[in-house]
Image (cartoon, helix red, strand yellow):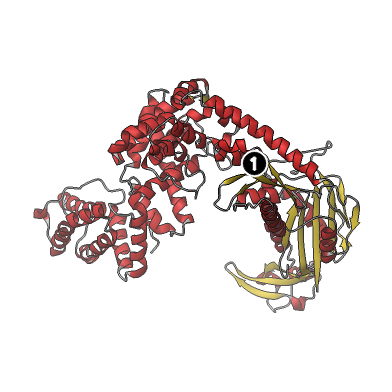
Amino acid sequence: MAGELLLEIGTEEIPSDYLNSSLVAIKKLAESYLKENRINTGDGLETCGTPRRLVVFAPSIADKQEDKIQEITGPPKKAAFDKNGKPTKAAIGFAKKHGVPLEELKIISTSKGEYLHLERRIPGKPTGEILSEVLPRLIADIPWPKSMRWGGLGFAFVRPIHWILALFNGKIIPFEIAGVKSGNTTRGHRFMAPEPIEVTGIQDYMDKMAKSFVIINQDQRAKIVSENAARAASEVSGKIKEDPELLSTVTNLVEFASPVCGGFDKGFLELPEPVLTTAMKKHQKYFPVYDQDWHLLPYFVAINNTVPRDESLVRKGHERVLKARLADAAFFFSEDRKKPLLQRLDDLKAVIYQADLGTSFAKVQRFARLAEYISEQVEPGKTSLVKLAARLSKCDLVTQMVTEFPELQGIMGEIYARLDGHPEEVCRAVREHYLPDKAEGELPSSVTGAVVGIADRMDTITGCFAVGLMPTGSADPFALRRHAIAIIRIIESFGWDISLQGLISKSISILADEIPLEESPLFEKVLDFFRERYKQMMLRSGYKSDPVEAVVSVAFDHIASLRSRVEQLEQFIARSEESELLLLAFKRVINILKNQEEHSKVDPALFKEPCEAKLWRTFLELKDDIHHLMVQGEFLSVLKLLSRLKDPVNEFFDGVEILTKESPSLRKNRLGLLQNLATLFLSFADFSKFSV
């Protein structure tokens, strides 16, 4: 039979950015723990929640555990039966110990011989009993970015727990956690329905929540928030932009959604739009209102958690708070404009970037030199713009506006640079050098922004590695993984044929002018870090492990062409009937060369068999064409040419004794032939990474 499970954890207000991820985690944990305890979840589990409650429910889970078949191996057959086939004391004792008649014992064959064997069915326990043990563990194991303890209890949770509703088929699942006993009561809205509410099941719970001003389902709540905001904006002939991040934040701040449209002085519209929208969205969680052409209007929509008794009073409260914010912003903007942006560069000398790496001014000086180096490699005509953009890129960090609104770094730099009359590409670069701001985020559109962004990130990576601030499995405070992925994506996007190894070396050499370091070990660590990030990026994008490993292990430098090489190798392996034979031929070459000395010189005069001359001749015929096609990026054609070597390789192995003891010079010559061949193969990929 099936039953229904309902669990609600009632808490103090949970931070809005914790709620969505916690509900995903709770569902995974609950499914895992129920499966672990052999409880069938039927139609599955669902989760929902508000700032004050986390809810798990399942409408049709099994009312008892599945029975467990326990397999028990007893004594060996030869010890269990005598010569006449009668049970010995060992067999009788084994049956008695497990409470079964001798007739139920079986004989099984194992790698160690024949043994007595017993299959025992252990009846499953009622689900209610299991849930009393599982649910406290589930609650305790929910992962949180930060937790707290309260009331002298050792228990840690995101916020203090006030009540626990736990029912299976309408009956209380008894347990206690954090000093709170489970029960059959919940609470409605904190202000509009605060009294305890008795619940009998899932549908009863949903109905009573709806009547108690709690929109329990977050998707439904988001829809209501969005519709209410749009309706409120329409009161002033305005509309709301789609903003999933703001919508999610507001949805997770309220249990009930009551909108109010407020306004502010039109004079504030003279401020840059990002200043206004940041003050509204980031600080007050208000929805900005736009006209039909998407120009900002002097209005906003706030979503309240309660139905106000006097809407005009609530509106005035929101307007008063926002007015103070915007007045501050107007003052900051006016003060910032009194000093050109570039003149703030020296102010960065008073800002510590990192204790061992110096000030932000020192960092700018380093990555400006690196940006100049990159520009000369990829776009020499942009070098003067790049140098200026690099010097301007961090100047807004010491403006009053960015000090108050950190989210505007780069954005205000672009605005101030434009007002100062700098070239448009330089202005955009000040903002775009921060892009992408997340793993799959938007990339810079300008060469200047891309170059400065790479230089800034590379200086951060090499600097952090130099002073021992490498990422760990659980921490990456300087976002070095994201910075590495960003550098790779930008280079790929612009198709720049720049040496990553050269870029790392240049960054390290610039850093070495300021702090003591060992350049060679640092170079290897940083290069390995980039290589691993690239491999992970490719695997997450759906590429297969073997082709990625085969290419990256031999050719991790000019990364703009690596993806194409991996793709064409995948195509060749998937479509070519001869690919397996090529891989086998390469592995024969690599295996025999293991632990052999380097003998790259080949003397054709020492050839004794026709297969030697044939292999050498084929190698010479293909070598230059392969190198030319590699430069052109015609990797599929390279693989087709390499395939022409498989037959001569196999004939060579079958026709001569490579490690001959007949003559040291003959042995060296044959090894040299194979080493030249291996070098040619490895110029494309290490085919030994494939499992054939």
Residue at the (31%, 34%) spot, across then down: 383
Is 491 positioned to the left or the right of 673 in the image? right
Q: Which residue is mark 1?
A: 280
Residue 60 location, x and y as percent?
Answer: 77, 70
Residue 234 location, x and y as percent?
Answer: 67, 54
Residue 517 location, x and y as percent?
Answer: 41, 26
326 w.r.t. 58: above or below? above
Classify mark 1: helix, strand or loop: helix
Quadrant where the N terminus sits is: bottom right
Residue 140 location, x and y as percent?
Answer: 75, 48
Residue 425 visible to an observer of this rendering: yes
Tell me the amino acid under the disc marked 1.
Met
Q: Nearer the viewer, residue 617 or 543?
A: 543
Farthest-out residue, left: 605
Q: Nearer the viewer, residue 291 or 359?
A: 291
Q: Nearer the viewer, residue 414 or 6?
A: 414
428 w.r.t. 570: above or below? above
Counting the numbered discs, the total is 1
175 w.r.t. 146: above or below? below
